Image: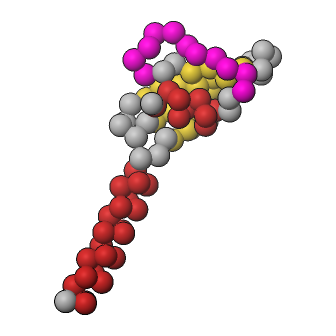
Amino acid sequence: MKYFFHTFSIVMILFTTSVNADATVRVIDRGVDGDERYYQVVCPNDKHTSVVNRFKIKQVCVYKIGEKEETCRSNWNPNQAAKYACK
């Protein structure tokens, strides 16, 4: 019985770890165009959106999934904007 409980615990830890690993927001750098750097965002639900870092006006903008207008903030970095977009 001890062996079963020990094995079951290890399997559950590994399963939980792999599920959480898939729940990450991926931010992929797509390059610079003029005064802007573009990023592709892949959400945990496999939906895609984009983030733009606008250097000249010092803002990071994102199109949140399901919304038609972009949201911009000066205190964001691309990772923070990506997490906001995937909510």
Q: Residue furthest bottom?
A: 2
Residue 31, position in %: x, y? 65, 30
**Residue beneath the point at 49% across and 41% down:** 25
- Position of the N terminus, as image quadrant, is bottom left
Question: With 5 as the anchor, is 52 left or right in this view?
Answer: right
Name which quarter of the figure residue 55 lies in.
top right
Residue toward you, 53 or 83: 83
Where is residue 51 shown, x and y percent of the image? 58, 25
| Quadrant assignment, res 48 | top left
The residue lying furthest to the left in this view is 1
Q: Is residue 8 magenta?
A: no
Q: Is residue 51 left or right of residue 47?
A: right
Instruction: Between residue 7 and residue 70, name the one nearer to us.
Output: 7
Rendered location of residue 67, percent (x, y): 44, 14
Residue at the (41%, 47%) spot, across then down: 23
Q: Tell me if residue 33 can be seen.
A: no
On the rendered structure, is 5 left or right of 36? left
Residue at 61% x, 34% y is: 80
- Residue at 48%, 21% in the rendered image: 64
Is residue 22 left or right of 85 when viewed as pictured? left
Q: Work out which quarter of the rendered image holds the C terminus and state it.
A: top left
Q: Quick check: 46 above or below 68? A: below
Which region is colored magenta? 65-75
Residue 80 vs 11, above or below: the answer is above
> Where's residue 27, x and y in %?
55, 38
Which residue is at the front of the view, 27 or 64?
64
Q: Main secondary structure of the magenta part?
A: loop
In the rendered image, the vertical position of residue 68 relative to residue 13, given as above or below: above
Whether residue 66 is in magenta: the answer is yes
Query: Is residue 87 visible to the viewer in this orientation of the structure?
Result: yes
